[in-house]
Amino acid sequence: MTEAETEYAVNVVKHIFDGHVVFQYNCTNTIPEQLLENVTVIVDASEAEEFAEVASKPLRSLPYDSPGQTFVAFEKPEGVPAVGKFSNMLRFIVKEVDPSTGEAEDDGVEDEYQLEELEVVAADYMLKVGVSNFRNAWESMGPDCERVDEYDLGPRENLAEAVNAVINLLGMQPCEGTEVVPSNSRSHTCLLSGVYIGNVKVLVRLQFGIDGPKDVAMKLAVRSEDEAVSDAIHEIVASG
């Protein structure tokens, strides 16, 4: 959430639950002459309409080079893969530290620091869970909740780039080494598995082919335990 060489280093971990999302902001103070106190992140969720802030936990003290965490929790519709963008402002009281004694001044001043935007995306609701034998798992899942469609992925540098893009978009676990695309291939099949929000098992079969000089076409077949989830996977790809 911050550039590498900044005064305060912050990265975020997203904790996803059925009815809540918790942002854990890992903070590091990189300035020896400063002590930060009462560190909070002010989150603007105006571009995340389905989320409502319900709690925040400030970080009482952030000395130099001693990482700490502050948390902000949001409520969201139960079992719904809500998505949205969040802007973030780090707010704190900064106190000067005497380098000879290491003691901080009694009085501090309030300050703030703009962080990068944070996004909750559909792939955040997918757990990477592998299967030992994809073919057996696919057959035992059955075709009742299968959804199949074809997509034009547009011009790509090569098939490997297209395969990686879709794997990252879905946030699923590649199976049986199928994420590896042999060089100069003009077609490829990739197998993915995962568990979606609501503890629903999902299997995906991706068939890629080069259509024209650089255009990549993809056939997406999804099987899951819930047809709404199969539809949701297609929606992720269609809107991604």
Image (tube, rainbow, N blue to C red):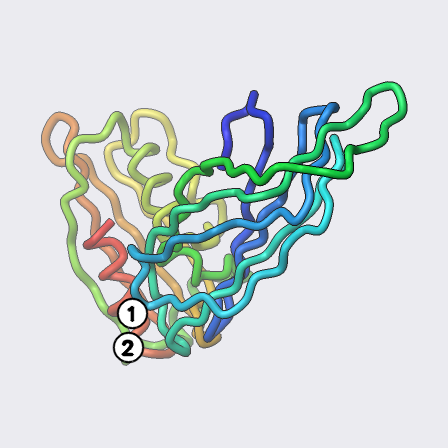
Q: Identify the residue position indicated by label 1 in the image.
A: 230
Q: Which residue is pictured at 39% across the width and 64% down the height?
A: 203
Residue 197 position in % (x across, y down) = 44, 70
Task: Please give left or right for residue 158 compared with residue 182 in the image.
Answer: left
Residue 51, picture quadrant: bottom left
**Label 2 secondary element:** helix
User: 10 Å neighbourhood of mark 2: few (<14), some, or many (≥20)?
Assistant: some
Instruction: Choose between 197 and 5: the one closer to the eye.
Output: 5
Residue 138, picture quadrant: bottom left
> Where residue 147 is drawn, which disc sits there?
none
Q: Which residue is pictured at 85% across the width and 27% down the height?
A: 102
Three-letter code, disc 1: Ser
Q: Which residue is pictured at 60% across the width and 43% down the height?
A: 92
Q: Are marks 1 and 2 in contact (CB under 8 Å)?
A: yes
Q: Which residue is pictured at 40% across the width and 71% down the height?
A: 76
Task: Please give left or right for residue 215 compared with residue 46 in the image.
Answer: left
Residue 25 position in % (x across, y down) = 58, 48
Instruction: Choose between 7 and 78: the one closer to the eye.
Output: 7
Is residue 52 visible in this depiction of the protein? yes
Residue 115 position in % (x across, y down) = 46, 38
Q: Identify the residue position indicated by label 2 in the image.
A: 227
**Label 1 secondary element:** helix
Q: CA distance from mark 1 to mark 2?
A: 5 Å
Residue 208, picture quadrant: top left
Residue 104 position in % (x across, y down) = 79, 33
Residue located farthest toward the right when viewing the structure as drawn:
101
User: 10 Å neighbourhood of mark 1: few (<14), some, or many (≥20)?
Assistant: many
Three-letter code, disc 2: Glu
Is residue 191 visible in this depiction of the protein? no
